[in-house]
Image (cartoon, helix red, strand yellow):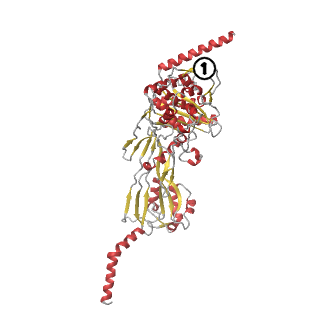
Amino acid sequence: MGLTGFTMLAGTTAWRQVIEGPKLAAKAQAERTVAWVNRAPRGDILGRDGTVLASSAVSYDIGVNQVKIAQYERIADSADSASGRADNEVIGHGAAAAAEQLAEILGVDAQELGAKMVGSSTYEVIAEAVPPDTWRRINALAIPGVEPDQRTRRIYPAGSVAGNVLGYTHEGEVRELIGSAGLELTQNEALTGTDGRGSVEIGKSGAIIPTGRQEEVPATAGTTVRTTINPDLQVIAQEAVDEVVKAQGADWGCVVVMEPATGKLLVLADSGAVDPSDPGATPEDSRNARSVQAIFEPGSVGKVITFAAALEEGTMDPEDTWTVPYTWTAANGQTFRDSHYHDTQTLTSAGVLAESSNVGTVQIGEQLDDEVRYNYLRRFGYGETTGIEMPAESAGMVSAVADWDDRTRYTTMFGQGIAGTALQAVQVLATVANKGVRIAPRVVDAWIDGEGNETPQETPAGQRVISEATAQTLTEMLIGVTQEGGTAEAASIDGYLVAGKTGTTEILTEDGTVASFVGFTPARDPAIAVAVIVYRPDGTYGGTVSAPVFRKVALAAMHTLGIAPDPSIIAAQAAAEADAAVEAAQAESADEGV
């Protein structure tokens, strides 16, 4: 070779060593590197007491490269030498040898497993949802071609409890969990963690090179979301609303329990609640929270707003009297009637509310300017979303005064011609219970990061709707609704005063009614406000359909919250029952005398 040739060869060698060398080395390393993703656990969702309602578990789907498995040689080790085999002796080949080792760990039949491992696929799943401990045992075998697919799966330990609140998830393109409904959807960003990664270098046989490059970046779990939901009360409410829906042949029902002073929801229960671990088993229109999304005319529950406005504006006092016939015709020719026939009565304002008289209510509402009443409807929360941390909340419907016709002007006085949600209905009574201040409802209590640092949800700023004096007066009137002679005696609770209002309204778009009761207790020192809505029951009235559900849920709440019965209330209720018994006995004696 001449000098020139030698010089060119040397130059080429130098070029490859200095310039191409690192590139070639990097390429070779990349070709023998196996990389994976360390999936980040999704944050937990907790009840207010710390009960885990939703959690995540890391598991593995185990796949095999059938081409590599076919080349596998099982080498005897110390465990095999006891049977007379020498170390490094080949004692098995291919899929059959690999299956014999894997089947024992996976608890499956070796022959069936081996059959799955034969073929030309570069990735064939042979086991799903394998726990990490099991994968570690499989990985220790160092069988070339056995490859894990790490996945995070969502677990709901309480089943359908608060299912319509929690929502559920689905897998994204790279198998990450994504919220599809409920809090899983609205809190998706917080719940989603940051994936880690890992990689190792492997030789031609598929075994890990001990001196090769290895990398391990751990995943960071998502933020835990603690809700305001009381799981025990949620169970009771779900059972109670499921029972009444079944007994009444209703389409659906819901129960909402709220702390008036904080806006925290102790219960947000829908009938037929979805099991988040198997949402497909529930009809699509029942997987979300109707308590937040479904709207209906509030009916007589809407009378509370009319009475609140009249008291606040000074156009009515509780002792004012009204002549109340069964039917009444307004000056514009519109005629209204009460739900039950009766002779003409003289009722106080409090009596009109207790008996839920439409005729009396329109006479009281007529004293108010329409714009004033419209403003009170909006101030109590109708026509706007509450801002609760749930998806697809409905604002309801409240038409502008300019759109009211001659009849709507009056029907809005008793809760028809407007529409809202169960959440908005409970907000009305909670405002009265909270001395006239409206607090927006919420279902998220706090966010907790991986270090245990807690960021509490701030209590929403309150909005004064009516004065404290008006709220107190209206409370006493609403107590009368649940006393003897009121429309909601079935909502009364021994040892506790209950303030509330029944509602019954016809559904304009289909046959049937909506029966409701919304109230709070203890009436003079309220701890909870509760709404019970039953859609299209066989029974008609809120006082007979929904009030008993209120009683069951509210009594359970009193026990759960540790609020003891009031001895003075117990004594007063006993005295009233005794008086009623005496009156009944006297009436019976009079009848016998006749």
Does the image show residue 418?
yes
Q: In this view of the protein, which residue sits in the foreground, 496 or 121?
A: 496
Name the image quarter holding the N terminus: bottom left
Q: Position of residue 157 (x, y in %)?
A: 50, 43
Name which quarter of the figure residue 18 lies in: bottom left
Check disc 1: other Cα within 10 Å, few if <14, some if 14-19, many if 20+: few
Q: Which residue is mark 1?
A: 345
Residue situated in front as seen by the camera: 291 or 196: 291
**Amino acid, disc 1:** Gln
Q: Provide residue 41's location: percent of width, then percent of height.
A: 44, 51
Does residue 352 lie above or below 380 as drawn?
Answer: above
Q: Position of residue 211 (x, y in %)?
A: 36, 65
The answer to whether residue 447 is left or right of residue 414 is left
Using the image as rendered, state which of residue 29 and residue 407 is in the foreground.
407
Left or right: 522 in relation to 25: right
Q: Quadrant of residue 582?
A: top right
- Location of residue 15 with respect to 213 vertically, above or below: below
Q: Quadrant of the C terminus?
A: top right
On screen, residue 449 above or below 84: above
Identify the residue at the far right of this view.
594
